[in-house]
Amino acid sequence: MIGFYFFLLFDWLVMKIPRTIRKKLFFALASLAHKLAGKRNRIIQANLNFAFGDALNLNEKKEIESYCYQNLALNLLQVMENKRNTTEDLAKQVTFENREMVDLYLSQNRPLIFISAHHGNWEIGAASLAALITPITSIYKGLDNDAFNPYLLEARSRHRLNLIEKNGAIKHLARALKNNQCVSLLIDQSSNAKSGIKVNFFNHPTYHTSAAAQLSRKYNAPIIGLYIYTEDEENYVIRFVEPIEVEGDDEQSILNATQRQVDDLEKVIRAHPKFWFWCHKRWKSEFNEIYTG
């Protein structure tokens, strides 16, 4: 609890200074974290080597490693800013590409399943989608330190984002879709044989969640991927990709729809590798040996 009070003091002080200075401060903290995180750096390099092999040189991989920490710092800063900003503030920072196809579905009162990843500033992505496009029901996983959870929930739920606990989340997502509402899922974290199906991801057989495809089939809800980009960490573009619909009632249709999601994700990561969350053990269920030694 004492740590949380120190965080609240830090939060209050940080939000008193101009954003340009805030960003420099957070980048400095990210640089320090990078220097101290030897184990996490090895995970990043293991993932990059496994995904890209020699397609990226050592300097490129080191630059991506360094930016992982900067990106995490930007997301933490965004949480703090989301606790205070308005819909108008978000509208000034964010533009959308291919929004017209989303608006068309919404005009038809269709439920939608938005999928995304820990790619770029996912905190501003979720807030902007809910605030500027449509209310969203999304999954929330509490932090290990319970003292921080009310703060995080308040920051994330201010902008028409309805958060539900991860345990038992599917029934809440299903209820929302049944009522022609929209939901969102982050689909890039590690999975296993119990909760996923095998697809091809960076040329490796990889377990991946099929939740989006299963829900899409049951509730006739198109799946729309969205990914966040920035050139200056000040202005952001949210790009919607082509919708995916499950074409049949068989398991092959589920697999095909899930593979399409993974293909879109991989295409985004290959084009902008520094924005992805390389510091988690994405392949721990299938190739855990790459993280040992």
Image (cartoon, helix red, strand yellow):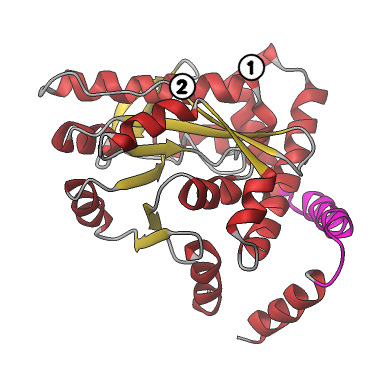
Residue ID for mark 1: 53
Residue 92 place in picture, x, y as percent: 69, 47
Dividing the picture into quadrants, the one containing residue 197 is top left
Badge 1: how crowded within 10 Å, few (<14), some, or many (20+)?
few
Q: Is residue 75 left or right of residue 265?
A: right
In the rendered image, the quadrant that contains the N terminus is bottom right
User: What secondary structure do most residues of the magenta stretch adopt?
Assistant: helix
219 on left or right of 69: left
Mark 1 touches mark 2? (CB < 8 Å): no
Location of the C terminus by quadrant is top right
Secondary structure type for disc 1: helix
* Magenta segment includes 22: yes
**Residue type of the residue flagged with mark 2:** Asp
In the picture shown, does residue 12 fall above or below 240?
Answer: below
Mark 1 or mark 2: which is in front?
2
Q: Residue at x 58, y 38 (%)?
A: 119
Tell whether position 33 is magenta.
Answer: yes
> What's the distance in space between the residues labelled 1 and 2, CA to CA?
20 Å
Q: Is residue 180 left or right of residue 275?
A: left
The residue range painted magenta reads 16-38
Of all residues, the one furthest to the left in this rendering is 249
Residue at the extreme front of the image, as rendered: 107
**Vertical comparison of 43 with 269: above or below:** below
Asked if one can make out residue 208 in the rendered structure from this viewpoint, the answer is yes
Q: Quadrant of residue 111?
A: top left
Asked which quadrant contains residue 160, the reply is bottom left
Residue lying at 84% horizontally and 55% vertically, measured from the top left: 32
**Residue of label 2:** 264
Residue 281 vertical placement versus 202 (above, below): below
Give x and y (percent) for residue 149: 50, 73
